[in-house]
Image: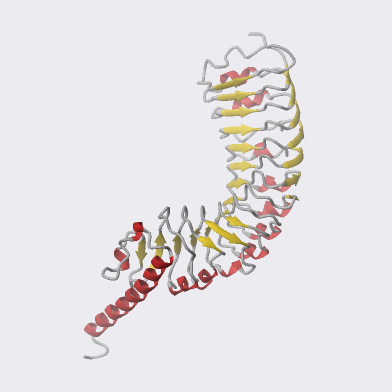
Amino acid sequence: MDLWSPDYEILSVYEDKKKNEMKSITTLLNLKREWGNPPLLNSWNSTSSPCNWPQILCSGDNSVTRIIAKDYNISGEIPGYISDLKNLTALVLAYNLIRGNFPTGLFNCSKLQYLDLSQNYFVGTLPVDIDRLRSLQYLDISANNFTGDVPPAIGNLTELRSLYMYSNLFNGTFPVEISNLVNLENLGMAYNAFLSAAIPPEFGSLKNIKYIWWTRANLICEIPASFANFSSLEHLDLAANDMHGEIPSELFLLRNLSNVYLFKNWFSGPIPLQIESLNMIEIDLAMNNLNGTILEDFGEWTKLELLNLFSNKLYGEIPQSIGLIPSLMNFQVFNNKLSGILPPEIGLHSKLEAFEVSDNLGSFSC
């Protein structure tokens, strides 16, 4: 057969695809055994192509590019030979029973972009050279048992769009190098026992950030003024920490902001006067040391569903504009120093589900 003939090229392509398929079958069946032969992976067998298995996606040359096996009752560990799947771009093994250390075998999967290992039983520290996963755009290791520090090398994963590390046992530090993740849109660090630390002002360089979840993570000090750079920010949750100082006046100037949770901290001073974040849906500033009045401008939040200001030191009257918010369902301002009369329109224009104004300077008149 002529080496340059179309028939030879077709045969060569077919042989390459068959080789890739056989290599993938061997690796995947070994993984299946390592993972305890879960019944939900019964389709993984030696008599069919992995490209036809529901949890597998292949490229045109029959190389495995994605494994999606969420909540499949997988146990065991992720062995080093997973690196034989060199064209892997996505690995989703969330909600399983996988144990062991972070799977460094993935370092040799140089095309890996999406890694979700959340809701498993991983232990130990993150590898100091985690930046070898240089193509990652999405990393979720939340709800595991990782400990120690978040390594500075994570700041070298500059393609990351989403980083979720919440609900682990991290008890060391988080690095300022996270501020190098200039493409980052989602950051979840909540529910960890980090050493007490302030949010570095350098984080203001995360100009594409949309979502910050940092509840109960031993944060201290003030909200950095550099948060004013977060023009894309939609969701900010710093609740249940030991932060103090005033709420930055620029916070409510962020026009895309829709959800703010700063409750159970030590914030003091007045609520910022200027409001341009007109897409606000939920705001919870309860259990702080805020003083001053509730602003009439709050009525401009016409999409607002939840407003919690209870257990502060607010005084004055509840603005009439609050009663005109058409979407308001939850309004709680108890345990303050408020006085005066309730807005007569409150509850007439929205379906209030929770309303609590008790324990103020006196009983409100109607």
- The residue that appears at 69% across and 32% down in the rendered structure is 274
- Residue 236, compared with residue 75, is above or below; it is above
In depth, the one of 31 and 299 nearer the eye is 31
Residue farthest toward the bottom in the current orientation of the protein:
2
- Residue 164, compared with residue 314, is above or below; it is below
Q: How far from the left and from the top, in percent, is residue 152?
A: 67, 63
- Residue 252, compared with residue 307, is above or below; it is below
- The residue that appears at 43% across and 72% down in the rendered structure is 85
The answer to which quarter of the image holds residue 249 is: top right
Q: How far from the left and from the top, in percent, is residue 338?
A: 72, 18
The answer to which quarter of the image holds residue 89 is: bottom left
Q: How far from the left and from the top, in percent, is residue 195?
A: 73, 52
Quadrant including the C terminus: top right
Residue 224 visible in the current orientation: no
- The residue that appears at 71% across and 47% down in the rendered structure is 218
Q: How far from the left and from the top, in percent, is residue 171?
A: 69, 55
In depth, the one of 49 and 270 nearer the eye is 49
Residue 52 visible in the current orientation: yes
In depth, the one of 128 and 170 nearer the eye is 170
Quadrant including the N terminus: bottom left
Mark count: 0
Residue farthest toward the front in the current orientation of the protein:
36
- Left or right, 66 with respect to 312, comes to left
- The residue that appears at 38% across and 63% down in the rendered structure is 37
